[in-house]
């Protein structure tokens, strides 16, 4: 009887440890998703403060290509660590991305809104157009995001795991909030400047000139992100306060021919 009791206690101890480990793993996964969602929220806010200048990098439908970039792991299709990046034509509707270190990838741009970003993992990020103003984007982790656009460009973003960002038009600006207690109001201040007021007291301000793509975002008096465009050389310089200093030269010209990689990529290898 005593042996049986000891065995029962041992089994209970092992079961508790396994349960605790499962709970720890789930907690770890949830924390990773929580941080990822917060990062996405900040990227969206910064893009709004910049008045979405990054979309000038891409041809139509630039809004969806811009969202594909934002939803990539680092927000720049994996090239945030590159100093120089060239965007050039590939085969018809294919944009080739290549940096000085030889890292390369491609984006297949289709007129129907179904686009594909290829790296060494093939379809790393892709978009699917459901309606005129509704898209689905799959990121590198396999997460699917429903993106709804409207006259204010974006109306909502929701992931299949339950994350939700909502955009609301308000007086002199708009409000962005999610279901992780992030909330911010972005309004025009003077001239072409914007102020983001978070519900927790944080303040960000973007400064730029009228009809200029050159803009900077400041928080607590420190520049945290800047975007400038050289019209004569057709290149973009993006810098942040974490060490990124990325110059992008875009010589890509869209050729309206659809469907290349989806039917021939495997054979081309």
Image (cartoon, rainbow, N blue to C red):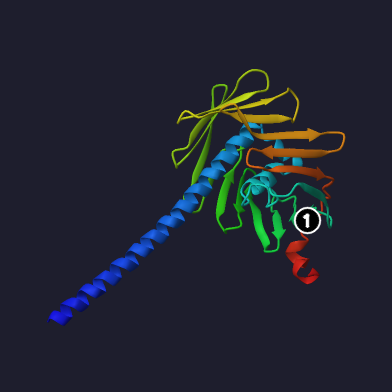
Q: Is residue 18 above or below residue 161?
A: below
Q: Quadrant of residue 194?
A: top right
Q: Which residue carries the number 1 mark?
A: 101
The furthest residue to the top: 190
* Drawn side of residue 39 relative to residue 119, left or right: left
* Drawn side of residue 22 relative to residue 29, left or right: left
Give percent across and percent down for residue 92: 84, 55
Give percent across and percent down for residue 127: 65, 53
**Quarter of the image containing the N terminus?**
bottom left
Q: Quadrant of residue 142?
A: bottom right
Residue 223 in sight from this viewpoint: yes
Residue drawn at (44%, 56%) of the image:
28
Q: Is residue 126 above or below residue 200?
A: below
Residue 151 in sight from this viewpoint: no
Residue drawn at (51%, 41%) of the image:
165
Number of labelled discs? Answer: 1
Give percent across and percent down for residue 87: 80, 49
Residue drawn at (49%, 52%) of the image:
33
Q: Residues within 10 Å of mark 1 (few under 14, many from 20)?
A: few
**Quarter of the image containing the C terminus?**
bottom right
Q: Is residue 6 above or below residue 182?
A: below
Q: Is residue 266 above or below residue 127?
A: below
Q: Nearer the viewer, residue 158 or 190?
A: 190
The furthest residue to the right: 232
Give percent across and percent down for residue 19: 33, 65
Q: Nearer the viewer, residue 180 or 244?
A: 244
Secondary structure found at label 1: loop
Residue drawn at (44%, 38%) of the image:
181
């Amino acid at each position: 009887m005593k042996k049986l009791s000891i065995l029962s206690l041992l089994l209970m101890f092992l079961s508790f440890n396994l349960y605790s480990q499962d709970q720890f793993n789930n907690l770890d996964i949830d924390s990773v998703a929580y941080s990822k969602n917060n990062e996405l929220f900040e990227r969206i806010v910064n893009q709004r403060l910049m008045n979405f200048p990054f979309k000038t990098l891409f041809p139509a439908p630039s809004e969806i290509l811009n969202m594909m970039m934002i939803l990539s792991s680092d927000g720049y299709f994996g090239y945030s660590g590159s100093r120089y990046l060239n965007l050039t034509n590939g085969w018809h509707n294919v944009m080739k991305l290549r940096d000085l270190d030889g890292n390369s990838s491609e984006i297949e741009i289709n007129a129907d809104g179904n686009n594909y970003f290829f790296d060494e993992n093939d379809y790393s990020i892709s978009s699917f157009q459901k309606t005129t103003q509704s898209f689905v984007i799959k990121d590198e982790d396999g997460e699917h995001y429903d993106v709804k656009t409207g006259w204010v460009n974006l109306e909502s973003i929701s992931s299949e795991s339950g994350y939700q960002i909502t955009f609301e038009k308000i007086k002199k600006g708009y409000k962005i909030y999610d279901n992780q207690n992030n909330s911010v109001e972005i309004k025009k201040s003077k001239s072409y400047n914007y102020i983001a007021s978070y519900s927790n007291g944080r303040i960000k301000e973007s400064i730029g000139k009228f009809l200029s793509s050159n803009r900077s975002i400041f928080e607590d008096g420190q520049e945290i992100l800047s975007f400038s465009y050289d019209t004569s050389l057709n290149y973009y310089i993006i810098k942040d306060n974490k060490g990124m200093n990325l110059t992008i030269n875009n010589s890509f010209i869209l050729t309206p021919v659809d469907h290349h990689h989806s039917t021939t990529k495997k054979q081309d290898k």
